[in-house]
Amino acid sequence: MRPPKQKRTPKHLQIRDELHRAITGAEYKDGQRIPSEVELAKKFGVSRPTVARALRDLEQDGIVQRRAGAGTYIRLAKRETRYVFGLLIREVGEIFEPICHGLAQAGEGTRHELIWGNAPRNIPREIQAEKLCEQYVERKVSGVFWAPLELTEQKDEVNWRIAEAFDRAGIPVVLLDRDMYAPPRRSNYDLVGIDNRRAGFVITEHLLNLGCRRVVFAVRPNSAPTVDVRIAGYRDALLSRGITADPEFIQQGDPEDSTFVQRILEHTHPQAIVCANDHTAACLMTTLSALGVGIPADVRIVGIDDVRYASLLHVPLTTLHQPCHDIGVAALEAMLQRIRHPGMPARDVLLDFKLVIRQSCGATLQQEGKNAIPLGARA
C-alpha cells in the first residue's frame, strides 16, 4: 500500500503564517502600513482574493487593521491589552495544579494576570464557589477559568447560579475538564479537556483485550458530567465486542464503603473494574485489599487521570494520562480567542491522552507468562 498523501496547507494559510512571522519578528512596526493586496499577490504568486483571505484572518486575530481606501496597518499595540483572569476551582489537587501551571506559563511574557479569589476554606464548598464568583464579578475580571462544582447534591443548582452571574456581568468563561451539564445537554461555554468518551472506550477496550468480559464501571455519587461521558465510552467498548451493557454493571457508591464494595463483588462477580478516576480507583483498591481480594489476581482495576500517586499505590495503577499542562496552555488560547471573537459558537477543545499500563490490570503478568490461568478466573 502506498502511504497516504499529506494534505497541503492552503495558500491563504501559508501567506497568513508568513506575514504573522514577519510582523512578530519586528519586520514591521506598530501602525506601519503593509504592502497592498496587489503587491502581496505579486510577491506570493497568488490571486488577490487569496491575499485578502489571509489578511482577513490576521485582522480577526487582532494583528492588523484594514482601513477602507487606506490599506492594511499593523496594530501590535492592541495585543498588549492587560487581562486579569480568575480561577474558579474548588481545590487544586493532582489534576488542576498542572493545568494551572500550564495557564501561568502560557501567559509568561505577556501582561495577563491570573488571580485566585480569597474565600474561607472552612465553609461548605458550595458557598466557597459562589463567594469566588461574587469576587470576580465585583472586580470585573476579563474572564474566568472554571471547573464546575461536583460531588455535592447541590452542584447543579449552584453551578447554574454561578453561570447566570457571569452571563449577567458579561464575563467570558472557559470550562476546564468538565461541562456543567450532563450530556446530551451542553452549556454555552468553551470547554478544554480530553475526549472523555474515547477515554472510557480506550480504558475498557484494554481490559477486553486482556480477555475480560464481566467489566464493571465504578463511580461516586454526584460526579462531574465527564463521568457520564466516560460511561458512554465504556458502553461503546462493550457493544463493540457484542457484550450487552448491563445497567447493573454501572455501580454508584462510596469506594471506601466496604458494604458497597462487597455488594459489587457479590452481585456482579467482576473480572475487572473501570473506575471513573484514579482517586476512586485508589480508594477501591484499599477497600478490596481489606476484604482479602487480590489485585489483579482476583479483580483487575484501572483508572483515568494518571495522578502522581498512581504509580506509588501498593499495586501500581493502570490508567490514562491526561496532558494537564497542555490543557492549561490550550485553555488560555481558547480564552484569548473568545475575547477577540465573542460571537463564535461554543467549542470543545479536546486533547489526546496516553494509556499507561502498570500492574493493576494484570497485563504485565500475562506478558511475562506467569499466569497459566486467566486472571479474574474466580468469576
Image (tube, rainbow, N blue to C red):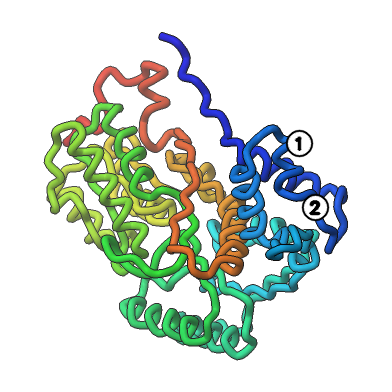
Q: Quadrant for the C terminus, please.
A: top left
Near-viewer residue (112 or 373): 112
Can you tell which quarter of the image residue 337 is in?
Answer: bottom right
Near-viewer residue (224 or 198): 198
- Write down the residue under mark 2: 34
SS type, badge 1: helix
Can you tell which quarter of the image residue 333 is in?
Answer: bottom right
Task: Name the residue located 71 percent from the left edge and 48 percent from the top edge.
Answer: 37
Badge number at residue 153: none
Q: In the rendered view, does 287 fall on the left or right side of 34?
A: left
Q: Is residue 281 above or below residue 224?
A: above
- What residue type is disc 2 on? Ile
Task: Name the residue located 21 percent from the left edge and 53 percent from the top edge.
Answer: 250
Near-viewer residue (48 or 255): 48
- Write down the residue under mark 1: 43
Q: Is residue 379 above or below residue 364?
A: below
Q: Position of residue 126 (x, y in %)?
A: 43, 82
Q: Position of residue 321 (x, y in %)?
A: 50, 43
SS type, badge 2: loop
Task: Name the residue located 36 percent from the left edge and 77 percent from the top edge.
Answer: 155
- What residue type is disc 1 on? Lys
Q: Is residue 305 above or below residue 300?
A: below
Gap in Å between the C-alphas at discs 2 and 1? 13 Å
